[in-house]
Image (spheres, helix red, strand yellow):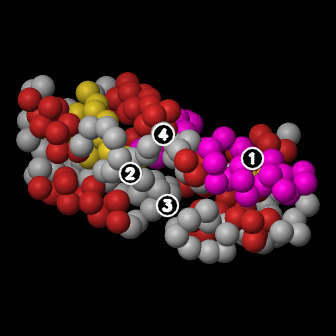
Amino acid sequence: MVRDCAARAGALLGLPSPPPVGFVDVCGPTLQEVLTGLTDPVVVPFFLASGYHVRHDVPAAVVTMPGASVTPALGAAEEVLQALADRVLEASPRAGESAGAAATRLRAVLVVGAGSSVDAARAEVAQVSGLLGARLGVATGTAFLSGPGPRPDEELSRLADDGSEPGHVVVAAHLLSPGHFLDRAHRVAATAGTVATAPLGTHDALAALVARRYLEATA
């Protein structure tokens, strides 16, 4: 998914080949490995919030790379909100129901993130949740699947107690890719009798955001 998003961003920028992709955890190639030999590289942290990886691992990887620059993480950019709102509306319709009707029936959204030990990173997710609620005109909550902060089942109960009818609360997965955390988000939603959204990284808006980050860094 990450490589596909990078390739789509590269196509938007008119690059002759897909941008290289490096990883800071779990798998390779590492960010240091892909940066070696590049001239004045621009690193776009493909993270939804500025947690430990963005604040420590990425800077540590580029500190010895002359001319390297690092853009902000994806954060609460317009493209992230667009992708999240689209995913919520995609997940909402019943059989034969239009997206507009689903939007009318929607009562609340629970934004669920993977979690972070960094307070500021969790605050960024809460900011996205508030902005998403304002965009969709619904109540929102924020929960995390690991680390400190509210748990999804607790927040789903709170939103239901606030007057939302069963099935009217959509779990918005504040996650980029398929994997362990997305599976957990979908299990939480299924247990509560509702639905969770698809990952954000496959949405075209995220590729557009990566391309925009690069252009802003090189302007």
Could you tell me which residue is drawn at 65 percent across and 63 percent down?
6
For label 1, the residue is 70
Q: Position of residue 109 (x, y in %)?
A: 27, 37
For label 3, the residue is 202
Between 163 and 46, the one nearer to me in the picture = 46
- Report how far apart the C-alphas of labels 4 and 1 lie in the structure: 19 Å
Disc number lying in front (1 or 3): 1
Q: Position of residue 136 (x, y in %)?
A: 34, 31
Which amino acid type is shown beneath numbered disc 3? Answer: Thr
- Report how far apart the C-alphas of labels 1 and 3 lie in the structure: 23 Å
Which amino acid type is shown beneath numbered disc 1? Answer: Val
Could you tell me which residue is drawn at 74 percent across and 47 percent down?
70
Q: Which residues are magenta?
A: 55-84
Q: Residues within 10 Å of mark 3 (few under 14, many from 20)?
A: some
1 or 3: tag closer to the N-terminus:
1
Disc number lying in front (4 or 1): 4
Which amino acid type is shown beneath numbered disc 2? Answer: Ala
**Is 33 covered by the magenta stretch?**
no
Q: Position of residue 144 (x, y in %)?
A: 32, 45
- Report how far apart the C-alphas of labels 3 and 2 lie in the structure: 17 Å
For label 2, the residue is 114
